């Protein structure tokens, strides 16, 4: 009887060991997929004809930016008519063309925009995605370019980001006091929250897969995941204003992250929470209200000289 008990315990231990090894292999594979964006697999850049027929987009200019660590970025620039300019930041494994509808909206109201492809995205160099850690250098390159433009008032530069772009916007604004206002649509509060949300999207158990993924991501990056946590830095943006947009049906990030970021932010701060919205749906499903709110926010926070 004791022999069978030992054999049973041994078999159970083997099964647990194999399950752990299998989970680790899956987590490592998912981590690799998450942080790499090969050029061959990227979404192609598109300039929708309906947008390009907009007369105000005639001045669309292709530019190349170079970051402080030597990465070459593809970008579009639209000159400002009111001397205020917004840096637009796209989301994870997207590209600058996804920001054209918002760019067109801002241009209608006289704003200039600069839209870079993040490193490892679109037509920019690199294949590694760091979820904001290195991408802040891409935002800095766009900011430095704006300082060379005579039509741009350096006291009237704002940020608007989508998803990973919004998290990066919050991280960068916390570093650069020259950024005067931030709009963050569907941001994640922490990298851990984002990983957990996306494991749930695959209908897989968050434990142990999410912690294992974070473990492998940290080892591949060489820096701790908690450094990519807008919630730890958002308070540093105050007294510059922040507008956070979060949908209650978001499955790409934790919907509760919007309230957490709002609670952690200093004044002035605004939260537009809509329980019916999914990820990045505000400018699609609430287009008129999105335009009204966002433009009013930038008009108020980036005022021209009287």
Image (tube, rainbow, N blue to C red):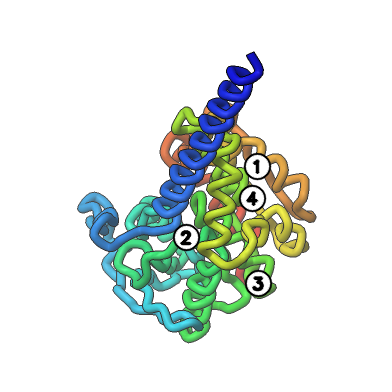
Label 1 and label 4: CA atoms lie apart by 11 Å
Q: Position of residue 141 (x, y in %)?
A: 49, 78
Number of the label disc, if any, that sits on residue 89: 2
Q: Is residue 143 left or right of residue 5?
A: left
- Crowd band around label 1 with a 10 angstrom C-alpha radius: few (<14), some (14–19), many (20+): many
Residue at coordinates 62% horizontally, 75% vertically from top-left?
Answer: 155
- Does residue 98 appear anywhere in the picture? yes
Which of 302 and 25 lies nearest the eye of the viewer? 25
- First of labels 1, 2 by sequence position: 2
Up/down of 267 relative to 288, above or below: below
Which of 194 and 77 lies nearest the eye of the viewer? 194
Number of the label disc, if any, that sits on residue 14: none
Position of the N terminus, as image quadrant, is: top right
Residue at coordinates 45% horizontally, 61% vertically from top-left?
Answer: 129
Q: Position of residue 205 (x, y in %)?
A: 54, 30
Q: Secondary structure at mark 4?
A: loop
Q: Secondary structure at mark 1?
A: helix
């Amino acid at each position: 009887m004791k022999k069978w008990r030992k054999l049973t315990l041994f078999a159970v231990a083997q099964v647990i060991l194999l399950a752990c090894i299998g989970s680790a292999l899956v987590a490592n594979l998912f981590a690799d997929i998450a942080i790499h964006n090969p050029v061959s697999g990227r979404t192609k850049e598109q300039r929708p004809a309906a947008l390009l027929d907009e007369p105000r987009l005639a001045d669309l200019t292709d530019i190349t930016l170079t970051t402080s660590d030597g990465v070459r970025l593809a970008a579009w620039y639209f000159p400002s008519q009111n001397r205020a300019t917004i840096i637009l930041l796209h989301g994870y494994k997207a590209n600058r063309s996804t920001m054209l509808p918002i760019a067109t909206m801002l241009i209608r109201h006289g704003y200039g925009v600069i839209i870079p492809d993040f490193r490892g995205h679109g037509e920019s160099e690199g294949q590694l995605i760091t979820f904001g850690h290195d991408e802040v250098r891409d935002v800095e390159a766009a900011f430095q370019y704006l300082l060379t433009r005579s039509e741009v008032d350096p006291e009237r530069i704002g940020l608007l980001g989508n998803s990973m772009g919004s998290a990066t916007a919050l991280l960068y604004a916390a570093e650069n006091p020259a950024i005067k206002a931030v709009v963050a649509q569907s941001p994640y509060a922490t990298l851990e929250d984002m990983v957990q949300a996306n494991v749930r999207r695959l209908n897989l158990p968050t434990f142990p897969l999410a912690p294992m993924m974070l473990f492998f991501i940290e080892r591949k990056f060489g820096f701790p995941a908690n450094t990519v946590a807008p919630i730890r830095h958002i308070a540093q943006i105050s007294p510059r204003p922040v507008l956070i947009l979060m949908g209650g049906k978001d499955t790409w990030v934790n919907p509760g992250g919007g309230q957490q970021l709002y609670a952690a932010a200093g004044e002035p701060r605004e939260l537009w929470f809509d329980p019916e919205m999914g990820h990045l749906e505000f400018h699609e499903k609430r287009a008129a209200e999105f335009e009204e709110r966002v433009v009013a926010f930038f008009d108020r926070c980036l005022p021209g000289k009287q």
